[in-house]
Image: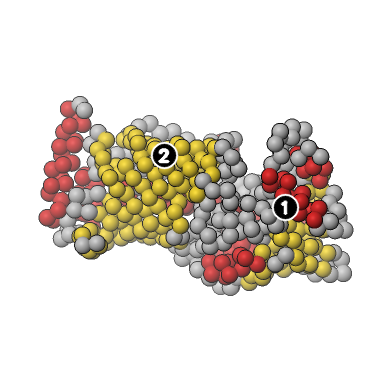
Amino acid sequence: MNRKQFLKTLAAGAVALAFAPTLYAADAADVLKRASTAMGGDDLKTLVYSGSGMGSSYGQAYIPGMAWPKLNYSKYLRQVDYEKIFTSEEASRGRAEPKGGGAVPLSGEAPFTGVASATRAWQSAGGAPVARQAAHSGRIHDLWITPHGVIKAAMKANATAKEVTQGGRKLTAVSFTQPGIMVATAYINDSGMVERVESRMPDAVTGDTPVVTTYSDYRDHGGVKFPAKIEQKMAGSMTLDLNIAEVKPNAPVDASVPDPVANAVERVTSEKVADGVWFLAGGSHNSVAIEMKDHVVLVESPLGDERASAVFDTVYKLVPNKPVKYVVNSHNHFDHTGGLRAAAAEGATILTQAQSKAYYDKVFANPNRIAIDRLARSGRKAKVEGVTEKRTLKDATRTVELYQIKGSDHADTLLMAYLPADKLLIEVDLFTPGAPNAPAPAQPNAYHVNLIENIEKLKLNVDRILPLHGRVVPYAELLRMVGR
């Protein structure tokens, strides 16, 4: 440790000694100032920390209401820039349990990066950056609930402080609101360390959602105190259990925004695949619009309000005089349900696999108050109907058949839609076509095999697949992927 670091450490220790007798009598501004100094955060502009542990695929439960699927993190790295408002979370992730969703391979590990700047959000799962604006508020929330981040955020807000006793110990609870991002309370101990942050953040599926993040075993890193243990729960289920091995205060952080993300707009392309049937793509998640005699059936309203609004606008242009009566939800994973609140705001009835209905009734009744969404502004109540094994939507012009996909480890609530007159199958996550002429894997993908088994058991005569990720392909492409 050099002389400057020694003096900073000595000063922080002196602050900590002076902290206990005056903490609880002070107002919020004084509490936060002394906590910032005790943790070495006064001159902290960036922070890079890394370690390993466990996480989970948030919003990717096998059945709604179950805990999020657990993941092993062999490597975890977070970079934050408090001045530029930037956060990057990188992990090498592998499944700790077989069932449930997420961009995680069935075996082995895969890299994942989730990033947010002050105005943009994007991610990568081993490829090029892809804009994911629906994740923006959640990632900014994660930046400001870091131990130093929550102090800095509270300093800028009209925070309040009060003494509380928990487990026989006195703590100071500092509460504040960050509009559109969160309401939060930071619990600070008599040494000036942030022990826990209880926050509520907006979520496109669950509404205002509770998050509890616990910090323990603080250690000194050149005058900056940072916990060696981080634990977090979101909506009551574990999302992080990390052991922090390395902390680099004021390390360089590249806070630039990639051009494809900076220039990204929510774009919906339409491809007519049959009379009255349009494949709506242009982003990471697709939808399908099906024209009936006096209404439209929309298969999938994904991600969040922004994507859903663009999809509905496109449908109204394609079929201007008919309302969207039904929105078919493929399954309960949050990236595929994030636009359902917007669908309910449009007055559409949501058709989902029966196991999801009670969960959706509950979470859609919980409003987004922190960041008001389309459903809250509409004043409508979500209408949800469950589909068990099969439901047929039929009128004088068309038949649409909905089937539960059975036996998949991805989700037990998967629905696929089949248009018998056009021999079209709409599915998601079990088969995402690769590039044209991509070689078939040496070992057939279990999801591919499961999808074919369901198609053949139901005796569906499929000509083309309309996947909700990727491009339209002949059914023969799926068969080729399993060596048939």
Dot label at residue 16: none
Q: Earlier in the sequence, mark 1 or mark 2?
A: 2
Q: Is residue 299 left or right of residue 48?
A: right
Q: Amino acid at mark 2?
A: Ser
Location of mark 1 (residue): 427
The colour scheme applied to this rendered structure is secondary structure
- Kindly report the distance in space between the C-alpha atoms of the residues bearing marks 1 and 2: 35 Å
Which of pointers 1 and 2 indicates the residue nearer the eye? 2
Seen at 64% across and 70% down, the residue is: 384
Q: Position of residue 197 (x, y in %)?
A: 34, 55
Secondary structure state at the residue bearing disc 1: strand
Image height of 271 relative to 309, above or below = above
Which residue, given by chain and number where applicable, does mark 2 sit on? 52
Judging depth in this view, the residue of 58 and 153 nearest the camera is 58
Q: Is residue 288 left or right of residue 103?
A: right
Q: Residues within 10 Å of mark 1 (few under 14, many from 20)?
A: many
User: Which residue occupies 16% across, 33% down?
Assistant: 7
Mark 2 closeness class: few <14, some 14–19, many ≥20 residues within 10 Å: some
